[in-house]
Amino acid sequence: MKLAVFSTNPYDRDSLTAANAAAGHEIEFLSVRLDHRTAPLARGFDVVCPFVNDRVDSAAISVLKAGGTKLIVLRSAGFNHVDIAAATQAGLTVLRVPAYSPHAIAEHTIALILTLNRKIHKASNRVHELNFSLDGLMGFDLFGKTAGIVGTGKIGIIVARILSGFGCRVLAFDTRPSDECRRMGASYVGLDELLARSDIVTLHCPLTPQTRHLINERTLATMRPGAMLVNTSRGGVVDTRAVIATLKSGHLGSLAIDVYEEEGDLFFRDLSNQVVSDDVFARLLTFPNVLITAHQAFFTREAVRSIAETTIANVSDFAAGSVRDENRVTLKMIAG
Ligand code: NAD
């Protein structure tokens, strides 16, 4: 099949080329993001392959449909960047990579918690400047603290297991509680109770209409004073302006994020010579108790290889008329 890959970085090119060696699909790598303006570039391609910050809205989908696209293969588990209703109506199949390495995201979440708590990023900079003072670097023991996990699917369960290993009490909130998570010692409670009791709150639910701004002015106010909030799920789950207000008031103790609501205009590019026009993001950068990585939780050798292999398998399965149901994104999944 002919496949147009949007938002390509060198690692996408390498991993997809390797995964495609046996399948032999014809791949065009494009560095531009897919949206309604760039969708004409996919004319004549059976398949488009967007990444998480491409905007596959109804306008883009109608251009893709007119250009002959039949299949959208996502190089991600999340599918909030695609208008699934519009794709379904246009008769386009949408396939994703439901699981590549949930360990990659869970382990990055733990890296953020440890780094932010023990201020490793600052400590390392200090030592490189021969400043061996410990002033301002004090953290807290994770042992004995309460960690609240919102969304106990593939990633959340691993985070629960690792934090239990640290000796944390684990609270969980999910619209579909999991026995596996319970067996790990987690107790399911309501969202407000989780927020009120947790020293660390970490988000692992998908971005859906129900979870957009789940963390907002009201829910932030229910959090324990001084608690840490961690988001490696999707930026839109958190109302960033409300978080900034809560950081300014001192109620929220610290924040670690790998995702940001408006990351589409920032992440995955080198903007070091440009002026940041996003004032909300610029404000976040000024807080000493905020740690930000640029959507790299997925970025391990194992995860990138697995994403490429499943993406190519999805294209081959579609060509053979045998799509795996678990990889299909359906309207039912949006309804929650
Ligand atoms: P999953 O589908 O296995 O688990 C998601 C869980 O969230 C499920 O248990 C589901 O029941 C729960 N959930 C859904 N709606 C909810 C709600 N309203 N309230 C509470 N819980 C709710 O998904 P996963 O593989 O664990 O991934 C979770 C999310 O992580 C993805 O949707 C994606 O947005 C994000 N992610 C981020 C990265 C990254 O690089 N930062 C990489 C992969 C995935």
Image (cartoon, grey):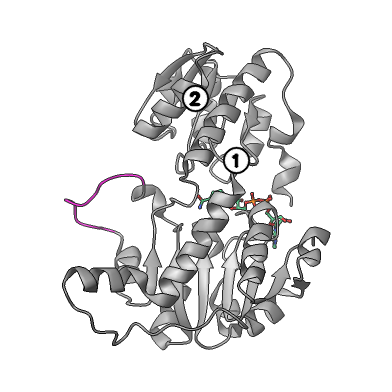
Taking the spot 74% from the left edge, 49% from the top edge, the residue there is 335
Q: Quadrant of ligand 1?
A: bottom right
Going from N to C along the chain, the mark reached first, 1 or 2, is 2
Cβ atoms at labels 1 and 2 below 8 Å apart? no
Whole-percent x, y for residue 303 in the image: 53, 40
In magenta segment, residue 271: yes
Q: Which mark is residue 100?
A: 1
Q: Secondary structure at mark 2?
A: helix
Give whichever of 109, 130 is nearer the camera.
130
Give the residue furthest to the right.
Answer: 179
Instruction: Kindly report the secondary structure that dominates the magenta region of the rendered protein.
Output: loop
The residue identified by callout 2 is 63
The yes-or-no answer for disc 1 within 8 Å of ligand 1 is yes
Numbered disc in front, either 1 or 2: 1
Report whether residue 267 is seen: yes
Q: Which mark is residue 64?
A: none
Taking the spot 72% from the left edge, 23% from the top edge, the residue there is 323
Whole-percent x, y for residue 131 in the image: 19, 78
Mark 1: give few (<14), some (14-19) or many (20+) Cα within 10 Å.
Answer: many
Taking the spot 65% from the left edge, 40% from the top edge, the residue there is 98
Magenta residue span: 268-277
Report whether residue 240 is seen: no
Is 306 placed above or below 198 here? above
Number of numbered discs visible in the structure rendering:
2
